[in-house]
Each structure stands twice: as structure tokens, then as C-alpha cells.
């Protein structure tokens, strides 16, 4: 088995374990992130109703950052998401890191979302 497929399998396993415990409710929706090699995406999801309450990504037109794939960009996405979530009436969320390590871009986005008014 190649190293890449091993890494993907481990992340998938971590993701399944997290999703078993984390479930978004209307009172406390789930903040889910996805990190690709070029962009970072984040959504606030109500799993009961099955709808997205707020979303932001480094591909948005509102995104003002220079680069779209570094920590500064992730921080801008976190601030943008927090602003949109607060406008939608959401202040408390459950953080779903999607099997990713809480490190680098993921941590920068989470810290910026906290500074923007989200509690998790």
C-alpha cells in the first residue's frame, strides 16, 4: 500500500470517529471545514434540518486576501464565516475538523472564527 493511500485511510478513519460524536442541532450547529491544496472552505450546518446556515471559502468574491492557500487566507475565511454566522443568528457551534489535525491552516481558521464571535 502506498503512503498516500495509507494517509487517506487514516484521515477517513479519524473523520468517521469524529462524525459519530458530532451532530449539528439548531441550537448548536456543526462548523465543518474542508482544506484542499489550493483553498479552504467552511460551513455552519444544521444536521437536523439538513441545511447550511452560513458558508465561506477562499474562493468567495468577498475574499480580500492575496493568497488563497496560506494561514493568512484561512484566518480571513474564519473571520468571514464568523460574521456571516452571527448575521444568521448563530453564536455557538460544534467544531468538526473533518479528520484533519488541529494545526496550521485549520487552527488559524478556528482562532479567527473565535475572534469573530463564534463559541466552540
Image: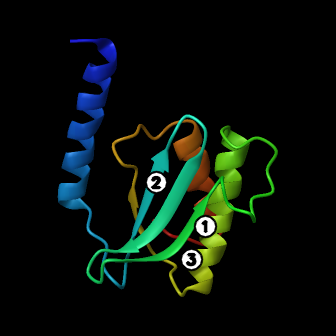
Residue plotted at (57% across, 48% down):
40
**Residue where numbered disc 1 is placed:** 81
Q: Quadrant of residue 45?
A: bottom left
Q: Is residue 51 left or right of residue 80?
A: left
Residue 85's mark? 3
Check if mark 1's residue and mark 3's residue have beta carbons within 8 Å. Answer: yes
Dot 3 surroundings within 10 Å: few (below 14), some, or many (20 or more)?
Answer: many
Check if mark 2's residue and mark 1's residue have beta carbons within 8 Å. Answer: no
Q: In the picture, which quadrant includes the C terminus?
A: bottom left
> Cα distance, mark 3 to mark 2?
14 Å
**N-terminal-most mark, 2 or 1:** 2
**Residue where numbered disc 2 is placed:** 33
Q: Is residue 39 left or right of residue 4?
A: right
Q: Is residue 75 left or right of residue 15?
A: right
Q: In the picture, which quadrant includes the N terminus?
A: top left
Residue plotted at (25% across, 51% down):
18
> Cα distance, mark 1 to mark 3?
6 Å
Amino acid at each position: 500500500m502506498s503512503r498516500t493511500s495509507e494517509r487517506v485511510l487514516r484521515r477517513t478513519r479519524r473523520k468517521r470517529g469524529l462524525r459519530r460524536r458530532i451532530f449539528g442541532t439548531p441550537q448548536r450547529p456543526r462548523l465543518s471545514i474542508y482544506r484542499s491544496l489550493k483553498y479552504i472552505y467552511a460551513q455552519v450546518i444544521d444536521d437536523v434540518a439538513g441545511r447550511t446556515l452560513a458558508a465561506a471559502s477562499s474562493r468567495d468574491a468577498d475574499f480580500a486576501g492575496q493568497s488563497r492557500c496560506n494561514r493568512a487566507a484561512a484566518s480571513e475565511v474564519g473571520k468571514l464565516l464568523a460574521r456571516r454566522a452571527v448575521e444568521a443568528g448563530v453564536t455557538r457551534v460544534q467544531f468538526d475538523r473533518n479528520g484533519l489535525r488541529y494545526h496550521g491552516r485549520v487552527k488559524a481558521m478556528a482562532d479567527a472564527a473565535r475572534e469573530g464571535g463564534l463559541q466552540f
